[in-house]
Amino acid sequence: EPEAEKISRELIPSEAEITDINFDPSLGEIIIETKKPGLVIGKNGTVLQEIIKQSKWRPKILRSPPLKSKIVTHMRHYLHSESRERERVLRTVGERIFRPKIYPVGDIRMTVLGGAQEVGRSAFLVSTRESSVLIDCGINPGSQKPFEAFPRFDSPEFRIDQLDAVIISHAHLDHCGLTPFLYKYGYDGPVYCSAPTSNLMTMLQLDYLDVASKQGIVPSYDQKDVRECVLHTIPLRFGVVTDIAPDIRLTLHNSGHILGASMVHLHIGEGMHNIVYTSDYKYGTTMLLEKASKDFPRIETVITESTYGGQDDYMPSRVECEEGLTRIINETLERGGNVLIPVPAVGRAQEIMLIIDGYMKRGLMREAPVFIEGMISEATAIHTAYPEYLSREVRNSILHDEINPFQSDYFTIVEHPSIRQTILEGDPCIVLATSGMLEGGPAIEYFRNWSHDEKNTIIFVSYQIEGTLGRRVQKGINEVTLMDNTGKIGVLPVNLHVESIGGFSGHSDRRQLVNYLTHLVPKPERIFICHGEKNKIRSMANFLDRKATVHAIIPQNLETFRL
């Protein structure tokens, strides 16, 4: 390895600005991190060819992120340190995928383990005579009871020892939060997802353990299980067809929901059946991401979300939302109040950062300190590590114009909780903090200090799951019971202004859902409607049955369907 690194550094021009070199012996790769990948590749790939020829290692070129991510760095180093075990995992996965088939393809079934007529704990088992694949493995953050919080792994269809693969659509806890739990109970197979999802998922799982520890809750897995998950994760690019079982091929497509969020296309047998699991998707333009893909080679079955599928769930236009956010912030700052925007660390946080930066630069929003709290800074650093997954406008700004909106002078990262008191006692400001549903994280601390004062405002910009504190505040509760830092429980009055702006959601509204499902190419035979409240799911199903002439099905958890 030292000799290969020396050769590579001699061949690569110094102008390329190499920031790090690592090795992945399991894949025979030398991983070169650089600020200018084009110079490392060379004209017509000449530099790469020389590196291969002289070092006998296959170069993998990564762009150095403008913001350093601890998670990305630690994961790369961990995989390098465990290269022998990683090699064993990949070899075992390959042998299992290409094992001799025992049964002819047939008896394709889909079992709903979670996410039916609810938002949370998404988990869908797809089985054939030969194979078994789990799509998503989420947790319900609004419930503490295992039978309501976890997927129904007690289903007779689910056998962890027969599971070929796990596919994670995106890095939100209700879709990936329980994945390490599988390794705790004996799973030794692969997890497939996009590269950004791999990093973001690990970040969220570690934070889940941290929050559980602080709240005195015994979590369902530990850091050892998270490390096992990292070791078994195989990142895939959008559009690349991958064998994941003897009779199942997987392709990931952009869903437009958050960074790296994927729609899952399963091709079963040689054209026998095709499933598209949409997961959460945005069929509309946002500042951060391109809209969801809708063209697939073949589709017979669709499993769709319906978070905003109610007949009245029409979001205002982006311009209205941005102007509404600007107006609320300006009014709050003018009356001497503070603005708290609780956001999930991934997705909405970065979208709101782009809007605030843009509107302040244009002089349309009052300038005020903008403090970034919790995991948002780490999640944002991961965003800058994958500019190819961002919208064309943001990608070009970062790569070509060398203007990174996430590094705006308006933003101040809160590096340590000790700084929080200075913020609370300081001038009027804007705070973006996790968690998005007020279920832990620094947002709770700001809410506790600001909720009594009617000059302040809390703005919800993401979906609030039933049972969470965010949902209760959003509904207009007058007082809440919270535990303070000393462990004492007290009652807090909720006098601050409560605002909700739905148009920033990473989910599609009713119009976008209908447009997407009725314009899918090719047209599916049946659509399973999940991931939504019961009344919204029924409304969507009735509409699709009547207007789209497609068979809409409302499944229940633990139901199995033969496809």
Image (cartoon, rainbow, N blue to C red):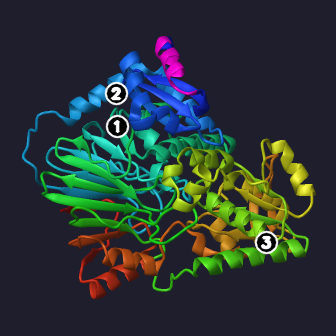
Q: What residue is pinned by disc 3?
A: 365
Residue 317 in the image, given as x and y percentages of width and height: 57, 80
Label 2 residue SS: helix
Q: Is residue 465 above or below residue 269?
A: below
Label 3 residue SS: loop
Q: Is residue 9 magenta?
A: yes
> Which quadrant would residue 516 be assigned to in this image?
bottom left
Q: Looking at the image, tell me whether mark 2 or mark 1 is earlier in sequence order.
A: 2
Amino acid at circle 2? Val
Given the current orientation, which residue lies at the most extreme left position?
104
Q: What residue is pinned by disc 2?
A: 89
Is there CB contact under 8 Å for labels 2 and 1?
A: yes
- Name the foreground residue: 133 vs 6: 6
Chief SS of the magenta region? helix
Q: Looking at the image, tell me whether mark 2 or mark 3 is earlier in sequence order.
A: 2
Q: Which mark is residue 190?
A: 1
Would you call the spot at circle 2 few (<14 residues within 10 Å), some (14-19), or many (20 or more)?
A: some
Q: Which residues are magenta?
A: 3-13
> Which quadrant would residue 29 be assigned to in this image?
top left
Amino acid at circle 3? Met
- Left or right of 524, for residue 469: right
> Which quadrant would residue 339 be assigned to in this image?
bottom right
Q: Is residue 138 above or below residue 51?
A: below
Q: Is residue 301 magenta?
A: no
- Left or right of 144, for residue 293: left
